[in-house]
Image (tube, helix red, strand yellow):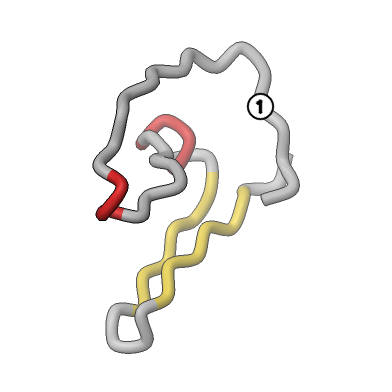
């Protein structure tokens, strides 16, 4: 998404292939921006807060 984070602890787990998940973002990262859900359209947007 065009942003780099330093000093971030990462936890890795195997995910079932049928889930088609490419990554999971934790709440600590999501809190750094504004998360918008448009469920009728199936859209999820994260806009980073100004640095």
Does residue 1 appear to the left or right of 35 in the view shown? Answer: right
Q: Residue at x 67, y 51 (%)?
A: 1
- The residue to which callout 1 is attached is 5
Does residue 26 appear to the left or right of 39 in the view shown? Answer: right
In the structure shown, which secondary structural element does the residue marked by tag 1 occupy? loop
- Please name whichever residue, 43 or 30, is drawn nearer the observer in this view of the structure: 43
Q: Residue at x 31, y 47 (%)?
A: 17
Q: Residue at x 44, y 42 (%)?
A: 23
- Please name whichever residue, 17 or 37, is drawn nearer the observer in this view of the structure: 17
- Please name whichever residue, 15 or 26, is drawn nearer the observer in this view of the structure: 15
Outermost front residue: 17
Q: Residue at x 38, y 34 (%)?
A: 26
Query: Can you give x and y, in whole percent of width and height, for residue 37 in the image?
Result: 36, 70
Q: Quadrant of the C terminus?
A: top right
Residue 41: which quarter of the image? bottom left
Instruction: Give the tally of numbered discs.
Output: 1
- Please name whichever residue, 13 or 50, is drawn nearer the observer in this view of the structure: 13
Outermost bottom residue: 40
Q: Up-down: is 42 above or below 12?
A: below
Does residue 18 appear to the left or right of 47 in the view shown? Answer: left
Please tell me how crowded label 1 is: few (under 14), some (14-19), or many (20+) other residues with Cα within 10 Å.
Answer: few
Q: Up-down: is 28 above or below 46?
A: above
Q: Up-down: is 19 above or below 39?
A: above
Q: Up-down: is 4 above or below 43?
A: above
Residue 7: which quarter of the image? top right
């Amino acid at each position: 998404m065009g942003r780099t984070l330093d000093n971030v602890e990462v936890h890795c787990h195997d995910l079932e292939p049928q889930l088609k998940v490419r990554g999971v973002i934790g709440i600590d990262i999501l809190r750094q921006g504004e998360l918008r859900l448009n469920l009728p359209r199936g859209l999820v947007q994260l806009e980073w807060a100004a640095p």
